[in-house]
Amino acid sequence: MGEKTINYDRLKQGGFLHQKQHDEDLFSIRLRIVGGQLSAEQLRALADASEKYGKGEVHITARQGLEISYIPFEDADALLDELEERGVRQGTCGPRVRGIVACQGNRICPRGLIDSEDIAKKIDDKYFAMELPGKFKFGVTGCPSSCMKAQENDFGVMGGLEPEWVEDKCTYCKLCQTACPADAIRVEGKTLDYDREKCILCGQCRLICPKDAWAVSKEGYTIYVGGKVGRYPRFGVKLTELVDEDTLFRVIERSIEFFKKEATPGERFGDTIQRIGFEKFRTFVLE
């Protein structure tokens, strides 16, 4: 029998990255981590696998992923089987939906306005590793602080809150003015001016007010599209703001449909939008 032929393209689909040590045929194995969340048992599984099959090292990628390096090809199946038994699944590379990044959102962070982990998991469940013309990256961030850089992803989701001033509860203490990062609130004596055009929907006025003088007028998901980093970075464009969850997932579905229909092989989402035209894209996904 001849030597076993290795299909490296197929391995890459499953998150295998051929290392520079070609003479030893070693791989880094990328794993499927949703929103950077891992249980203690998953961490123990990773430690055990890296010591048993690799060099006892686990690399944290720039997108909250994990890679175990120095894995001989012949050990890959055994490693993946052991990890899967303990709740750690295989990742992906190439022209498909990559791992979903997310902050902890309102489960943990006082500034969080949405449940980022929940949205990331729903996106992952439906779209992870979907074959597309080019790589496609989702980022979910809990508020306009944008810790997860929603504007740098092909499709970015950001929590937002539009405040409403409740005049009869206000003591004009100016705490909201001090907390507002956009200079959208001005208090002079017994007069308060709120500039909706300046507001970035962060909800800091509501968070800091000791008298509940700021209520919620509207809240939801703000969507950015077409962002990317790499050799030719581009900032994503705001598509719409404060939509509900059903609308968010309809926009995701239509965006992917647009990308499949219009993109050329290897093209990024933002490049497709730019080539076809933002208004045509906007009409397709929203109207």
Image (cartoon, rainbow, N blue to C red):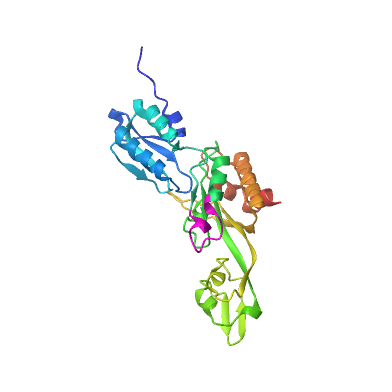
**Image coordinates for residue 232, horizontal then vertical, percent:** 45, 50
Is most of the magenta stretch helix, strand or loop? loop
**Image coordinates for residue 1, horizontal then vertical, percent:** 36, 11
Q: Residue at x 38, y 43 (%)?
A: 43
* Left or right: 167 in relation to 135: right
**Image coordinates for residue 209, horizontal then vertical, percent:** 55, 74
Q: Residue at x 34, y 35 (%)?
A: 49
Q: Is residue 151 visible?
A: no
The furthest residue to the right = 287
Q: Residue at x 38, y 28 (%)?
A: 78
Q: Is residue 200 magenta?
A: no
Q: Is residue 108 visible?
A: yes
Relative to 196, say whether 9 is above or below: above
Range of magenta residues: 103-117
Instruction: Name the foreground residue: 54 vs 253.
Output: 54
Relative to 4, say whether 275 is above or below: below
The furthest residue to the bottom = 189
Q: Is residue 106 magenta?
A: yes
- How many marks are shown on the rendered structure? 0
**Image coordinates for residue 117, horizontal then vertical, percent:** 52, 51
